[in-house]
Image (cartoon, rainbow, N blue to C red):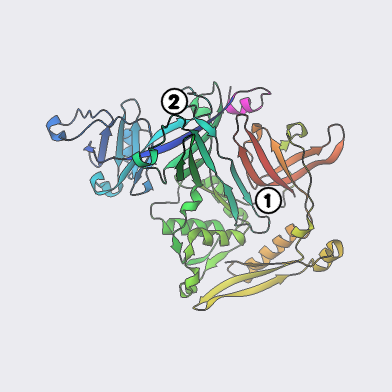
Amino acid sequence: MTFAEHTKLSVSDPRILIELDIGFANTQWVNNGAGIWAVDAENIYAWVDSTLLDGFTAQDFGHIGSVQRDGKLLDEVSTLAALTDDTDAFYYDAAGRRLYVCLDSYDEPSIHFIVAGVVYGYSYDEFTPPNAPVPYQGRLDSAPRISISRDPLYYGKLAFGGGDISLINNDGVFDTFQKDNELYGNPVRVYIGYAGLDYTDYQQIFTGTIETFKVGRQRATFAIAERRKSLTVNAQPVVTATTPATAISALITGKYSAITYDASYFDLTAWVAAGSSTAAYTVAFDSSITNDEGTNKPLIDHISAICGGSFFIFWITADGKFTGAAVDYAATTSSVIIRKDDILNDYDIVYDPSKVVSSVYVGYAPTWTSSGSVYQWLRNSDYEASVYSTYKTYREHKIETPLANVTAASAFATQFMSIHKDVKGEATINVPMQYYGSEIGDAVFVELERPNKTFIGTTLCAIMSASWILERNPTLQFGIRFI
């Protein structure tokens, strides 16, 4: 039985798996060929004269989930042979308990700081799925509530909820954990599955990093951060007029030399599709940006500005890749129908006129001087009279964007007003795991019905937020907005 089939059962046995990569700094490396270096958990190196290994000791490490070189995560390859074709990568031979690395420029590990992340597994109950890399200790006290949401008016501003992983520490096993290990910035993975499923059939729903750690006599708590938070290097980017997706990928790869625009770092299928759907909103950062020191700010802020002027949503997938999407407000259909019997909570439909906009004032084509930013401005007030007539309010939304020209700004303003000139119903619904494939930005039909007669009816909605509620009986929570 597959994961998808389990989600549709009325009775099932769901399991949450938490994997923390707990690091140890390794300095014992033995050359295993041109540019390839190895460390063996049991200190066995059959290809080397033992007299050359003076001072080497057994490390006795467990399964390796990640390796970092000077803070950069190395790619994982599936075979030792593949390592010869991929620098800054690692291969872990689980059967032989041996770790191999091949570093950039075929460097020796001794000139770098190498941290190997040993996988520590946790679940609500002691449990090991078939073919899992490690056993999962029953220490999980509470799992993080993983969520992603966006403000309906500020498209680039995605809010992420990662939260904490709380583990039982009654026996003091975590008392000196921080002192004994390399913790911060190491990967965290969250999976969901069902008893009886093979480990490879579990769904990975989150990849993050350890941000902080605290320990008490009853519990140890790891605060986890979403990986977008790592895009904090300050920048004053110069980008010639291009599509939002191309601009964002150029900013990331240009500022982080270790990141390349390929399938290792980007969900290319989704990225290309989102780029095509937002191509009309040409963006640019003029070279004069370096004149204004106020623009020297975290890269993620510049990315948010691009998203804010192009209806582009930027986030990171469950397996740690950059991705994008655009809400299709012209959608007329969807292959997904959330059935009324699958809505687990009582809900209200909220119609909030404070979210209605009567006009939009768009700043575009910015240039920068030592005294600040200078924008060209365009106002769309086509619906001002009709909005006032219906809702008795004037409300103008002002936004500064990196849109490159008046054509792009006009296209943005027209689309913005078509979306926000009317009150749209919104609701929060809890649904079972069978809807796990739906994401923020997707259009879905929702049966908004009473038990025996129509309430609102089947309505096409956009998913505005999504949360994984990872209790012992996990569910999903969607924030929806009528299209």
Residue 226 at x, y percent in the picture: 51, 47
Q: Residue at x 60, y 44 (%)?
A: 147
Q: Which residues are magenta?
A: 1-13
Q: Residue at x 74, y 41 (%)?
A: 445
Q: Main secondary structure of the magenta part?
A: loop
Q: Residues within 10 Å of mark 1 (few under 14, many from 20)?
A: some
Q: Residue at x 53, y 61 (%)?
A: 301
Residue 453 left/right relative to 308: right
Residue 90 at x, y percent in the picture: 34, 39
Q: Residues within 10 Å of mark 2 (few under 14, many from 20)?
A: some
Of mark 2 and mark 1, the one earlier in the sequence is: 2
Residue sitting nearer the eye, 393 or 456 = 393
Is disc 1 placed on a helix, strand or loop? loop
How far apart marks 2 and 1 lie (CA) works out to 43 Å
Is disc 2 placed on a helix, strand or loop? loop
Residue sitting nearer the eye, 248 or 208 = 208
Residue sitting nearer the eye, 318 or 57 = 57
Image height of 383 relative to 328, above or below: below
Is disc 2 in contact with disc 1, using a CB cutoff of under 8 Å? no
Position of the N terminus by quadrant: top right
Residue 268 left/right relative to 90: right
* Three-letter amino acid code at the position of disc 2: Pro
Q: Nearer the viewer, mark 2 or mark 1?
A: 2
Q: Which residue is mark 1?
A: 328
Residue 429 in magenta stretch: no
Picture disc at residue 135: 2
